[in-house]
Amino acid sequence: MSRYILKRLLSAIPVLLLVSIAAFVLIQLVPGDAAAIIAGPDASNDEVEFVRRQLGLDRPWPLRLQDWIFGLAQGDLGYSYILNRPVTEAILERLPVTLSLAGLSIIFATVLGVALGVLAAVFHRSWIDALAMTVALFGVSVPNFWFGLIAILIFAVGLGWFPPGGYVSPTESFTGWLSAMALPALTLGTASMGQISRFSRSVMLEQLGQDYVRTARAKGLGQGNVIGRHALKNAMIPILTVIGISFSLTMAGAIIVESVFSLNGLGRLMLHGIQRRDYPVLQGGMLVIAFSFVIINLLVDILYSWLDPRVRYD
Amino acid sequence: MAEPLLDVSDLTIALKIGARSINIVDGISFRIDPGGRLGVVGESGSGKSMIALALTGLLPNVMQLVSGSIRFQGEALELAPPARMRQIRGRDISLVFQEPATALNPVFTTGRQVSEVLREHEKISAREARNRTIELFRQVGIPAPERRISDYPHQMSGGMRQRVMIAMALACRPRLLIADEPTTALDATIQEQIIDLLAALQEETGVAVMLISHDLPLVAEFAEQVMVMYAGRVAEIAPADTIFEAAMHPYTRGLIACAIGLETGTSRLPTIEGQVPPPLQFPPGCRFASRCPHAAAQCAQSVPGLQPIGPQHVAACLRLDQMTKLEVAS
């Protein structure tokens, strides 16, 4: 088991290296003179040259790639002349917000999605199935910016249960953090919840027809044990894949949801980066998001091996 | 005569297809004495597995127990609520299925899957369940049981997996063990080992065994009584030791001819022409009539009842009185 995890960790290294190079290439692909674009239309030639030197764009690309990779190894993502601060610092400041948002929304999507899917499968073709799948369809089809606005209108403005926006650090107040993140996480997780529940239903239906489920029943085990333990543990293996995939959906959706709930997260930082052509910030943000995918996939792989003994030994 | 352990009478199971309902098991009666060995033989589609599921209350939703009674130790199982059936399953009546590769849960250790039955039905500690599981593994002939209880199903061979299934079935010392094609998915040499194991364990524990198989010689070797089924009905029930000589039903004789052909290796294997009709095409009269070499006009119209032939021997054929003569003539 630990050998398997070590192997997975090692295989993540080349992926991370490739991602770093891809992020580097992004800047090189900016059409025209990147320094001129960054310096802005009103910049003088000297200013453009200054920016060029600062970004190191006057040096040949192999050297710049080397600098970028070495900088990365030390946690240095470059400098943003628009924010006037190191990119690493700006990202680290925003990262907890986005991680909270993505993490909570995935937890919400997983718990509710799997529960709805299992219920729908167990009560296949009953009203419970129909209701669960209606909720799932709603989740998949409703645009999250609209859902977020409605949630603010009802639960924040109308009922006053949650704040309409803003971020509270969990180190400051845990309940404050939860209450601040509740609506954004719900909004962001709804689409994934729908996907996960629809997928869970079909996987669970398949598992419930397996021979080992009949064996478990023949042993005299109760419904909860047969479904919740025997069938669910098998069903979780493919469901886990979908949870991993829906994480990418979550990261993309974070940009919109952070804007709706005025959360200063990574998504908004990147949105501003796009608007102001802050390429170092975009490069850094892209890299961090790619890293998070790699880490999530690594986690999924490790969870696989925990769930499925056949993965461990093969 | 002693009180039977299991007394099934007039058991009828219907398959619901839309508004239609077809009796895929049609008025079956049999009994098993405590410690008895009943063999059930039939082709696929004969309804033999459905009987096993009906006895344990595990019929799939599309199947319905229409009528008949199932008396197990005097208790009417057809009326028992699901919670009661749960207590009985795995403790008093246990099942061994055909395909041990899929009948075991791939994500739990085999040891856990056996001890789980013990912990469900007997309030014992995890440690005690573990010790009993090791003992059960040893009893069913799994080498190095202390180590093998931590094995997952995919780490075991087919024969070992079936031994695990048997250990699971015997864990709570049931009164009745139903083995549904326990050897069909296994190699020929392993088949024999498993049947020998079942026989040895049966003698050791005194459990009654209902062995379901399509393999007549295998069943006849193991069982005391053999029930031959065809398309959801009993064709013949006969003592195992005389069935090869005394069989009266044309279907049983057909099966025997096939089996003997296999034994002696004649150049052309005897077969029973045709196939079991699908449930939707069950004829109104004798269901075997379309394949029967002795069928007469009456066979297509009326359903044959079970006729006594000798001690412990009954057969359901309208032309029983002509059978001996017919066989000699042909």
Image: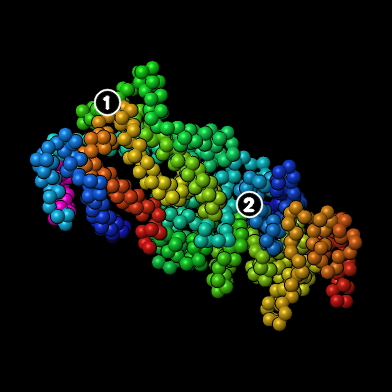
B300 vs B246, nearest the viewer: B300
Q: Which mark is residue A166?
A: 1
Decide if residue A192 is on the left or right side of residue A275.
Answer: right
A55 vs A204, nearest the viewer: A55
Task: Give the x, y percent position of residue B262.
Answer: 68, 77
Occupied quadrant, residue B154 = bottom left
Q: Does A147 appear above or below A201? A: above
| Residue at the (41%, 24%) spot, across then down | A150
- Which chain letter goes with mark 2? B
Give the main secondary structure of the magenta stretch.
Answer: helix
Residue B102 visible in the snapshot: yes
**Quarter of the figure with the C terminus of chain B:** bottom right
Residue A69 belongs to the span the image colors magenta:
yes
B117 vs A91, nearest the viewer: A91
Q: Amino acid at mark 2?
A: Leu
Discs 2 and 1 lie in a common subunit: no
Q: Amino acid at mark 1?
A: Gly
Decide if residue B309 is on the left or right side of residue A45.
Answer: right
Decide if residue A95 is on the left or right side of residue B289.
Answer: left
Q: Badges 2 and 1: C-beta atoms under 8 Å apart?
A: no
| Residue at the (28%, 47%) spot, across then down | A290
Q: How many marks?
A: 2
Occupied quadrant, residue A34 = top left
Local SS, label 2: helix
Task: Give the x, y percent position of residue A137.
Answer: 49, 36
Magenta segment, which residues?
Answer: A63-79
B330 vs A167, nearest the viewer: A167
Task: Give the x, y percent position of residue A48.
Answer: 13, 41
- Residue corresponding to mark 2: B53
Residue A281 visible in the snapshot: no
